[in-house]
Image: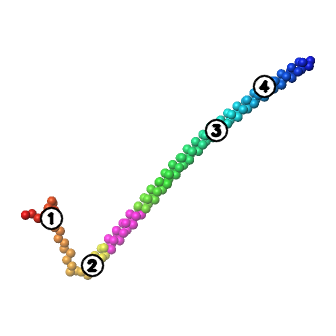
Amino acid sequence: MDPNTAAAVAIQAWWRGQLVRRALLVAASSARRIQGWWRRVDSQRKEQQRLWVLAEYIRMERAIVLLQAQTRAWVMRTEYKRCQEAARTIQSCWRNYMQRQAGCCTEDVDLHIDIVLGVPGDCGAQSE
């Protein structure tokens, strides 16, 4: 091959190499941009999912705390009512006992009470 043809082939090879390298560089750059965009989209999606799960957890936690508070209040009300009933029973038994004790010692006391019913609308005014 003559030197001019060899030089032309070398220049063409160099130039085609440059074109291929530029095409590969553009393709790699485009791939990096697409990958970066996809990573951002995926990261945002994961962050939204994480926030949704967190909000759901907080909602569930609040519901559990409310249910526990209601249950504790119900248990305490039940216990309070039971204590009230026990106190009433004790008071009733004590009063009965005291009446029996008082009844045996003071047999001569007259406990007769007269109840006077007024006329409706009278209000204590005397008729003339």
Taking the magenta stretch, the answer to whether it contains residue 113 is no
Q: What SS does tag 1 mark?
A: loop
What span is in magenta?
79-94
Q: Disc 1 to disc 4, how far (Cα)?
A: 121 Å
Residue at 46% over, 59% down: 72
Nearer the N terminus, badge 1 or badge 3?
3
Contact, mark 1 vs mark 3 (Cβ under 8 Å): no
Q: CA distance from mark 3 to mark 4?
A: 31 Å
Q: Could you tell me what secondary structure mostly forms the magenta stretch?
A: helix
Q: Is residue 86 magenta?
A: yes
**First in residue order: circle 1 vs circle 2:** 2
Mark 3 or mark 4: which comes first in sequence?
Answer: 4
Question: Could you tell me residue 111's position as x and y percent?
Answer: 21, 75
Q: Which numbered dot is residue 19?
A: 4
Residue drawn where x is 70% and y is 31% of the image:
30
Foreground pick, 113 / 17: 17
Disc 3 to disc 4: CB gap under 8 Å: no
Q: Quadrant of residue 109?
A: bottom left
Colour convention of the picture: rainbow
Give me the disc on residue 124.
Answer: 1
The residue type indicated by label 1 comes to: Gly
Q: Which residue is mark 3?
A: 40
- Residue corresponding to mark 2: 102
- Numbered badge on residue 75: none
Classify 10 Å Cα crowding around label 4: few (below 14), some (14-19), many (20 and above): few
- Judge the density around disc 2: few (<14), some (14-19), many (≥20) Cα neighbours within 10 Å: few
Q: Position of residue 35 (x, y in %)?
A: 68, 35
Q: Earlier in the sequence, mark 4 or mark 2?
A: 4
Image position of 38 with respect to 91: above or below: above
Task: State the separation of the CA atoms marked 4 and 2.
Answer: 122 Å
Amino acid type shown at disc 3? Arg
| Amino acid type at mark 4 | Leu
